[in-house]
Image (cartoon, rainbow, N blue to C red):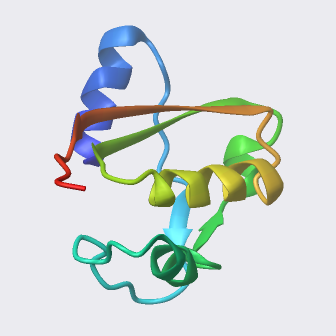
Amino acid sequence: MLVLATGIGSAVGLPVTSCVTTTRPTTQLKGVTDPDQRKALLDGLYTVEQSQTFGKRVLLFDDLFRSGSTMNAITNVLLAEGKANSVSVLTITRTRSNQ
């Protein structure tokens, strides 16, 4: 995914950094449909390198949008811990839902 983000960033003249990391091993959330369970799995999962985001407008890029839980969790960390000025999000695709 970083390769794709770097290509897009290069094409539009935006710098790309990989400043969000996980605090523990993660399991795939693909099969987790319960919103409360997804939130619990994501709680405290991400951390950010503040020196890369402090006071900046951040574009968060992900290849897949399902429920928005992951992007919300990362956005909250970018704003609270990373002290980003603002966060916008961009995804390439969205999963279908039968719900």
- Residue drawn 73% across the image and 31% down it: 86
Q: Relative to 61, is 88 above or below?
A: above
Residue 74 on image: x %, y %: 58, 56
Seen at 51% across and 68% down, the residue is 21
Tell which residue pokes out farthest to the bottom in this image: 25
Quadrant holding the C terminus: bottom left
Between 49 and 61, which is closer to the camera in this rendering? 61
- Residue 61, percent from left and from top: 41, 39
Where is residue 68? Give x, y as percent. 45, 51
> With 82 as the anchor, is 16 left or right in this view?
left
- How many marks on residues? 0
In this image, 99 relative to 86: left or right?
A: left
The front one of 6 and 98 is 98
Residue 80 shown left or right of residue 78 in the figure: right
Kindly identify the residue that appears in the image at 79 percent across and 60 percent down. 81
Location of residue 8 by image quarter: top left
Dividing the picture into quarters, in which one does residue 55 lie? top right
